[in-house]
Amino acid sequence: MPKAYEPGKVEQKWYDFWMEKGYFKPRIEPDKEPFVIIMPPPNVTGAPHLGHALESALQDIMTRWHRMKGEPTLWLPGVDHASIAAQVVVERELAKEGLDRHQLGREKFLERMRQWVKDCRHTITEQRMKLGASCDWTRERYTMDEQSSRAVRTAFARLYEKGLIYRGERIINRCPRCGTALSDLEVDHQDVNGHLWYVRYPMVEDKEKFVTVATTRPETILGDTAVAVNPEDKRFKGMVGKKVILPAVNREIPIVADEAVDPKFGTGAVKITPGHDPVDFEVAQRQGLPLINILNPDATMNENAGPYNGMDRYDCRKAILEDLEKSGQLVKIEDYSHAVGHCQRCQTVVEPIASQQWFVKAAPLAGPALAAVRDGQIKITPQRFTKVYINWMENIRDWCISRQLWWGHRIPVWHCRDCKELIVAVETPQSCSSCGSTNIEQDPDVLDTWFSSGLWPHSTLGWPDDTEDLRYFYPTSVMETAYDLIFFWVARMIMMGIEDAGDIPFRTIYFHGLIRDDKGEKMSKTKGNVVDPLDLLEKYGTDALRFALLMGTSPGNDSRLSTDKTEAGRNFANKLWNATRFVVRSLEPGVNIDREINRDRLPVEDRWILSRLNRTFASVTGLMEDFQFGEAQRQIHDFLWGEYCDWYIELAKIRLQANDTTPLPTLVHVLEKSLRLLHPFMPFLTEELWQNLKKHITWIDTESIMVAAYPESDKAMLDPAAESELEAVTEIIRAIRNVRAQYKVASSRWIEVKIYTGSSRQATISRHTDSIKSLARANPVTFLEGEPGDKAGDNTLVLPLAQATVVIPMASMFDLEAEKERVEKELKQTQNEATRLESRLKDKAFLTRAPEAVIEKERQKLYTLNDKLEKLKQQSARLQEVR
RNA sequence: GGGCGGUUAGCUCAGUUGGUUAGAGCACUCGGUUCACAUCCGAGAGGUCGAAGGUUCGAGUCCUUUACCGCCCA
């Protein structure tokens, strides 16, 4: 084995080996309950980022763990066509070529999209494989493949037939840049510093009288169809029912009373624009007011805007304000901060517009989805997200699913041009189902990308067909994703899964946090702080990256990734590499290691490490069951590095050096099982090391660590007495090392140690005399009974410990005279330097002429010197006492 | 406006039912060419666990109030 672990040389080899052996593909065993994770499909929007790497690591850990436990395990991969997100990305690419999609036309644009998806899928798959993902590639799916598309059309048609999908005119958010309706969730609200403009609307009956309204969007005046006041508001008594004249377009509109009006906003009278405000839309419906749309799809003003027809919305705002100013109707301007909706994908300010769209009636679907979580059929981890889920579900609103985009699932609805009938069908119809006309046309819109995502757990397993996969693997075990998808995706999967497949889509939903950069900033392309997982993989190795991604994380909490962590991962991998290298090298003489180890015949340090190993199994398993993977990983790390390497191997070396091969079975046994324990976390490294070990151990007959059994805790291996005994020994060794460091005893020097204990402890601790001698560099080591008391003598150090008292004669630690001389010399030198500095710092010329930074530096130097001086004086005094 | 999370060592974070002396990685200081590993070994320093009050034999952990930071929803 080479001196250091070189991940680049082994990773591809093992991934190919696993693929070749078909380990990723589960065998359907009807009598066993399977473990199933459906991979959240990455968007085809570019190269995967660190969030995907974390997701991959977590899901792979769970998958490998359950597979090793002997469960039929399926991790099903796939990718998402990402309708709007992908279209926006490709449109940007086109813009670089000076093109837009309309120039290409629908078909050519879709061709372009498909090519993009092809390239993107390749990158995504390649990266998943590099990350070690043990997913079943034979079942890989795509949200736009034939099966998924049919699932989408089927789900749509069934919901339509049940009256759960309808078409209607509602206020929706429209992104002028993307040119499409959006769902409420796709709008990001940001506080913007704007203005509140107060505008006078003259009364029809007496043009000298006015009603003043306040607005943040003056251009919408053009679409006003009423002014509303609160019915309780005494200020407007007698005005309700009268009419005012709308500025700019001189339309007469009524004053109405409606509960929705907040008397505290503005003047208490508000303008009602039913075509461009959701609250006003509702008021209009209640009051029977007409609706006027003043905007074109691209957010320019339309013919209803009168003189402003054709203007951009913001130019219109400016123009109308100037006109109002001129006519004296603009009476007041206030600074006003308010939330403005932005398109989640392109950050353009969205416009609320009343329009004909397709909606999913949410309430009937939310009922069972709510119950499934409330009853505990679906468990949400971490638990705190349960409340968030319930709160959202309880206040759910209808879901706008039609998009005026080209990329996505075309809505399975055909319009008859002759009889205006709507035909909803799974397969393309030839003629109108009502009048038989062949003059029919498919709806041009596509579906919200989350519609197909919502079907993912059942559509990937074969729904709407009754497949073996669907019967065996559904409901799935765990859905693992980021918490920011709770509404977009998780909620919809639960609703659609129950509706379509008749059962919950997964038993547990596990949320991980978001990965930020080392400064805690969200990674984004515009900020330029995006780290490519591939760069880290190549530099540090997959296992190191996986280790880093999990290090110090807890469920549902955001984490930062830094090179410090990846380095720690790499170092750990290398540590384990070398521990294995040591064990393998010790085996070389051709020693035969038995499969079973007889605990009772082993020395106490062997029983100790076996006990600690089995405690670690129990603890790690408990943590994994609880989804605490970061903590599980830490415990494995601590056991291997802090106990196995730091202590057990060091103890074993003492026997091995005396040509005693008895530690070998334990060395091998603990290492082999630990590698299996660690395998889900660091798959490549553990496979490589395990295979190296396998070459020397005949009884390792499994062909890969990934199909070897996951270790379980054996209670018979637990040994509290051995643990207590080793605690005493390590405490003694640590105490002696501590003293050596404190007194700067040369490492080549052996010091004398006397250990006082009770008689029963003496029998046990004295068994470790060789260990204490070797690891603390102490000789001679003698054991005495009871407490040292006066017997210790004057020139000794007395170290009282939990289970023993250690006494060290000072004289054995160093040549006293030489040490005194050394300290005095250093003391003198330091003193001289300090004096020189002091006098300089008193020199007026220096203080006035030298730059402040230099003076400060000198002051710091003096401060440090004085500190050192103090310590030297103390040491000198201590030495004097020794005589 | 409603909700959630965070506040623990210089930095980044663990710390799951309350229980000895609060941990890790990195950084720092001192010492190390002992045949697994300098991607290392040994030792050390560093924390009134945001604040105040309460429950308890015992609180980083539970309760109340509060400050600041972040996120989600409206």
Image (cartoon, rainbow, N blue to C red):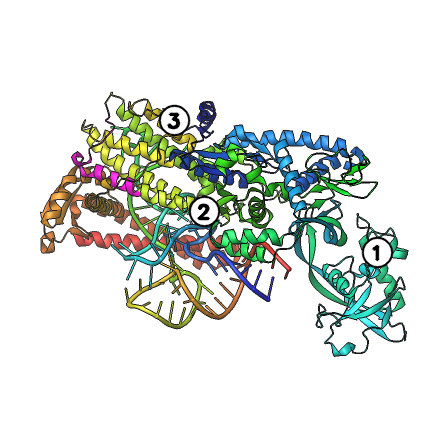
Q: Residues within 10 Å of mark 3 (few under 14, many from 20)?
A: some
The part of the chain drawn in magenta is A593-615
Rendered location of residue A762, percent (x, y): 12, 46
Magenta highlight: main SS: helix
Rendered location of residue A861, percent (x, y): 41, 52
The answer to whether A271 appears left or right of A795 in the picture is right
Q: Residues within 10 Å of mark 2 (few under 14, many from 20)?
A: some
User: Which sits in the foreground, A656 or A150?
Assistant: A150
Q: Contact (CB < 8 A) between labels 2 and 3?
A: no
SS for dot 1 = helix
Tell me which numbered mark, 1 or 2, is placed earlier along the sequence. 1
SS for dot 3 = loop
Q: Residues within 10 Å of mark 1 (few under 14, many from 20)?
A: many
Return the mark for residue A704: 3
Circles 2 and 3 on the same chain:
yes
Residue A158 is one of the magenta-drawn residues: no
Tell me: residue A526, above or below residue B74.
above
**Which corner quadrant of the image does residue A14 belong to?**
top left
Circles 1 and 3 on the same chain:
yes
Amino acid on which disc 2 is placed: Thr
Question: Label 1, label 3: how many angstroms apart (C-alpha)?
Answer: 70 Å
Q: Nearer the viewer, mark 2 or mark 3?
A: 3
Return the mark for residue A553: 2
User: Which sits in the foreground, A519 or A248?
Assistant: A248
Q: What number of labels is visible?
A: 3
Residue tagged 1:
A316
Whether residue A449 is visible here, answered yes or no, is: no
Question: Label 1, label 2: how many angstroms apart (C-alpha)?
Answer: 51 Å
Tell me which numbered mark, 2 or 3, is placed earlier along the sequence. 2
